[in-house]
Amino acid sequence: MARVTVDVVLKPEILDPQGQAIVGALGRLGITGVTDVRQGKHFELEVEDGVDDDTIAKLADTLLANPVIENFTISR
Amino acid sequence: MVTFPGSLDDRDAARAVRAAGGEPVALWHADPSLHDVDAVILPGGFSYGDYLRAGAIARFAPVMESLVSAARDGLPVLGICNGFQVLCESHLLPGALVGNAGRKFVCRPQSLRVENVKTSWTSGYRAGQEIVVPIKNMDGMYVADDRTLDKLEADARIVARYRLGNPNGSYRDIAGITNKAGNVVGLMPHPEHAIDPLTGTGADGLGFFLSLTGVAA
């Protein structure tokens, strides 16, 4: 068994209102210097040893992420 | 009308079909058969709780495999709100719908301009006709890359645009689009809630259903 993580974030050209709300909240906390936040999703998959990277990429591309609006990265 | 777990507006869609002189047929998400219907409506609601992304899980329902293939063969399909999200997730329509730019659920009467009246679902309107139907959504901001948006404009595939204010930040004020063939239409506002002045903003939405049944308004 191995743990594989898949991180999904909106593509740069897609507006992220939640990320912008977080930037606004940081200002109210008195924290300065954070100019942008992009909110994404983090998936942790427990996979058997026989599951290769191509399979993980396929499931990320078809289900975990919508490639029309999101990019993903896979890490083992 | 297809009912998914979490669909809300399947009954209103059935009522609209009946009001337009059609015979509504209930389809079930877990049943791959389309039961020889002449058209399919994917209703509004929150299929599968909007888990992951709105429409993302519904795309893999057994009924969707049959529907995607039938839609590619020309079956008229109208996706309203969550149905529009399902159509985008299924890649029957380009682009995607994400959280409203204002980050709040929007629920109000909305003015639209119907631009493409050549689709299966809009032939009963005049080009440029202005109508008012309710809008109610959380994830209603239509997004796509500039190339896709330019192509949609060039091919006149924008079915309707918001007017008098964009309720959700949709790129280029897009409220609804169609596929190349004009048989698949996705629409964020809810024409099925505006078919009778007694219970809605008016009857401006009935035209979508009359377009399909061919019954004169």
Image: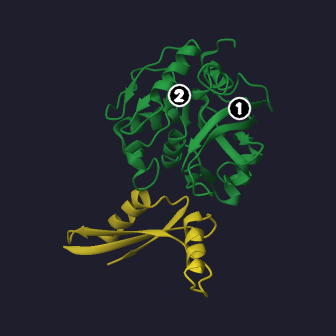
Chain colours: A yellow, B green
B79 shown above or below A19: above
Q: Given the image, what chain letter belongs to the residue carrying mark 2?
A: B
Q: Chain under label 1?
A: B
x and y percent of residue A61 in the render? 43, 61
Q: Are marks 2 and 1 in contact (CB under 8 Å)?
A: no
Q: Nearer the viewer, mark 2 or mark 1?
A: 1
Question: For mark 1, does the 10 Å Cα neighbourhood hold few (<14), some (14 to 19), or many (20 or more) residues?
Answer: many
- Residue furthest out toward the right: B128
Q: Is residue B17 left or right of residue A1?
A: right
Q: CA distance from mark 2 to mark 1?
A: 27 Å
Q: Which residue is mark 2?
A: B75
| Residue nearer the viewer, B203 or B176 | B203
The local secondary structure at tag 2 comes to loop
Q: Residues within 10 Å of mark 2 (few under 14, many from 20)?
A: some
Res. B7 in view: yes
The answer to which of B38 and B168 lies nearer the viewer is B168
